[in-house]
Image: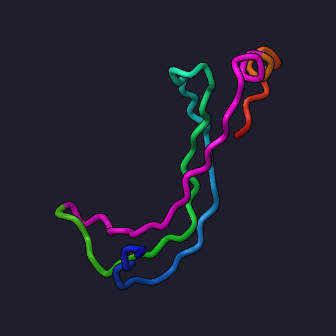
Amino acid sequence: MMPQMPPGKAVGFKPLSEEWNYYSVDDGYILGVKLVLAKVLKTSQTDQAGVPVYAVQHQVAVQVLTQEDYKNMTSRNTLTK
């Protein structure tokens, strides 16, 4: 069951940067992981400093690379963003 989003108004957004993070796992593969924003709601709440509180929905993108794939990708300096 998905957690319920708090009440709020949907607001538009555009990605300024969506970087991949790479991790070497014990079985020899490389995992690429990044968070991708799917929905943004501006709630009626603010924090103690008066900054608006936002609720977000996101997805986690994962890619599995071999050591060779990762070396080739980084040697060409073409990291996927």
Q: Is residue 26 above or below residue 7?
A: above
64 sits to left or right of 5? right
Question: Which region shows up in magenta?
Answer: 49-71
Please state the horizontal and vertical placement of residue 8, each as a whole percent of the image: 40, 83
21 sits to left or right of 53? right
Q: Residue at x 39, y 69 (%)?
A: 55
Main secondary structure found in the magenta portion: strand
Count of all numbered marks drawn on residues in the image: 0
Locate the C terminus by quadrant: top right
Is 30 magenta? The answer is no
Q: Is residue 63 above or below residue 59?
A: above
Is 60 magenta? The answer is yes
Q: Is residue 9 above or below residue 78?
A: below
Image quarter of residue 67 = top right
Q: Of residues 79 and 54, which is closer to you in this image?
A: 79
Please state the horizontal and vertical placement of residue 7, each as a whole percent of the image: 36, 85
Q: Residue at x 54, y 70 (%)?
A: 39
Q: Residue at x 33, y 69 (%)?
A: 52
Locate the N terminus by quadrant: bottom left
Q: Of residues 30 and 33, which is closer to you in this image?
A: 30
**Please, which residue is most extreme toward the left here?**
48
